[in-house]
Amino acid sequence: MLKENPLVSLISVLGTALSIAMILVIVLVFQINNSGYAPESLRSRMLYVDGINAKAENSQNNSSISAEVIKACFYSLKTPMAVTAMYKGWETRPVSLPSKRLFREYAISYTDHAFWEIFDFTFLYGKPFTQADFESAIPRVVITSEVAARLLGKVDAVGQTVIIDDSPYTVAGVVKPVSKAARTAYAEIWAPYSTNAVVMSRFPYCGGCGYLQAVMLAHSSGDFEQINDELNRQLEQYNAGQSGVVYRFPSGALTHLETVTGSNSWHKKPVSDYFLQTGLLLLFLLLVPALNLTGVIQSSVRKRRGEIGIRKSFGATSGILVRQILYENLLTTLIGGICGLVLALALLPVCKSFMLYDSTMQITFDMLFKPGLFAAATVFVLVLNLLSAGIPAVLISRQNIVDAINDSE
C-alpha cells in the first residue's frame, strides 16, 4: 500500500514525524530541567530558598540570604536530611598557579560541607572539603578534571595549590565535569564560602540580606510541608531578635518542579497553570497534523470503496475492516514516529538557544533516555493513529455494500 500511494504515504509519514518531533522537543526540554540525573539525582526531594524579603517601616528590600540567617534559620532545621547553602551568582573568577600568572576565568561556587551530601558528584581523585575545613575557613577546593588538566597538565591535582583572586587554595579533590543543565550543582571549582569575606559579610542596612541561597534535602517529598512549617518557626524566632525590620520568605521553600514551572522566591505560580498551558500546546501540535492526515487518509480509503464493498459482501464485518485500516495506518504512523524521534534529537541542539537558559550546556545520555519518555511517545503515536485513521475507517466501513461496490457517496 505504501508503494501504491507514495505521495499519500510520504505526507502521512512527514506529518506524523513533525508532530512527534515538536512534542518530543518540548517534553525533552522539560525533562532536562526537571528529571533527576547526576549530580542532581535527588531533585524530587529538594527544596529551594533563593531569596529573602526585608520590610522596614518605610522601605523593603529583596535579596539573597545572609550567612547569619543561614546559620540561624537553616542549619538548625531538624526535619531535613541535609541543608546546604551556596553563593553562585554565575560569576567567574581568575584562577592561576603560584608559579605563573594565567588569565583564564572559571565558574566558582562557594558552598559548605553539606553540599557534597546532597549532590552526588563522581570523585576521580581525593575527597571534598570537610566540616572542619569549612568551620575553620581552611582554603581547600574541589575542581573538575577539565580544570585540573588545563591548569596542571594532569588530572590528579590533589595537594596542588591554585590561586583564586590572589588567594592560595589547596586542591582537596577532583570530580567529573558537570553539565550546566544541573543549574544548582554546576561549577568548575567549589570552595568553602567561609573563606570568602564578602559572602560572610552582612548588608549594613539589612542584616538578613546577603549573597547565599539554600537547598534542603528531605527524607521524602511527604516532609515538604513539615519542613516549610519548621522554617517559618525558625524565621519567627529570628525576627523576634530584630529591631525595625521583619524578614520573610515570600514563596517559602520551593520544590524543584515549582522552580521549573515558573515560580521564584518572590512569586509562586500554580504548577497546574504550567501544565494546562503546555497541555494545550501539545494538544494543538497533536490535533493539527491529525486533522490534516484525516483528510488525506479519508481520500485514500475512499479509493478502496470497491474493495471494502466486496469484502463486506463476503461477510467481513465493520470491526474487521476498521481494524485492517487501523493496522495499515499504524505501520505508517510508527514509521513517522521513529522519524520524529530521530528528528527531535537532531532539533534539540538547534533549539537549545531559545528553549534552554544556556545554549552552551552539555546534554548527556542520562538526561534524554528515560523509559517514561518513550512510553509517552508511543502513546502519542497511538493517539495520532486513532485520530487520523479511526474516523475515516468507521465512516467507510459503515457504508452500504451496493454503494461501496459502485463507488458511490
Image (spheres, rainbow, N blue to C red):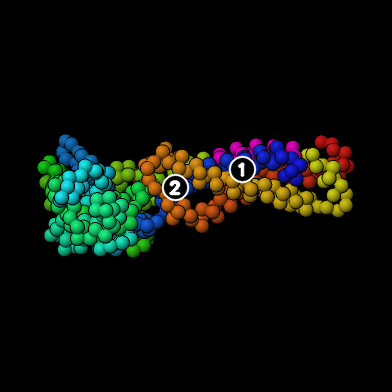
From this view, report whether residue 342 is shown above or below residue 218: above
- Give the side of residue 307 with respect to residue 209, left or right: right
Magenta region includes residue 85 = no
Identity of the residue drawn at 24% across and 43% down? 104
Identity of the residue drawn at 41% across and 51% down? 34
Q: Position of residue 257 (x, y in %)?
A: 39, 50
Q: Position of residue 353 (x, y in %)?
A: 41, 38
Q: Find the distance from the CA under tag 1 to the CA under tag 2.
A: 21 Å
The mark lying in front, picked from 1 and 2, is: 1
Q: Secondary structure at mark 2?
A: helix
Figure quadrant of the N terminus: top right
Mark 2: give few (<14), some (14-19) or many (20+) Cα within 10 Å: some
Figure quadrant of the C terminus: top right
Report the residue marked by disc 2: 30
Q: Position of residue 199 (x, y in %)?
A: 17, 48
Q: Secondary structure at mark 1?
A: helix
Mark 1: give few (<14), some (14-19) or many (20+) Cα within 10 Å: many
- Give the side of residue 276 with respect to residue 70, left or right: right
Q: How many marks?
A: 2
Residue 16: which disc? Answer: 1
Q: Nearer the viewer, residue 158 or 325?
A: 158
Q: In the image, what residue type sits under mark 1?
A: Thr
Nearer-N-terminus badge (1/2)? 1
Identity of the residue drawn at 44% across and 47% down? 30
From this view, report whether residue 213 is shown above or below residue 291: below
Q: Looking at the image, can residue 131 be seen? A: yes
Q: Which residues are the magenta region?
A: 283-300
Q: Nearer the viewer, residue 243 or 81?
A: 81
Location of residue 296 by image quarter:
top right
Q: Position of residue 13 (x, y in %)?
A: 64, 42
Q: Nearer the viewer, residue 27 or 179?
A: 179
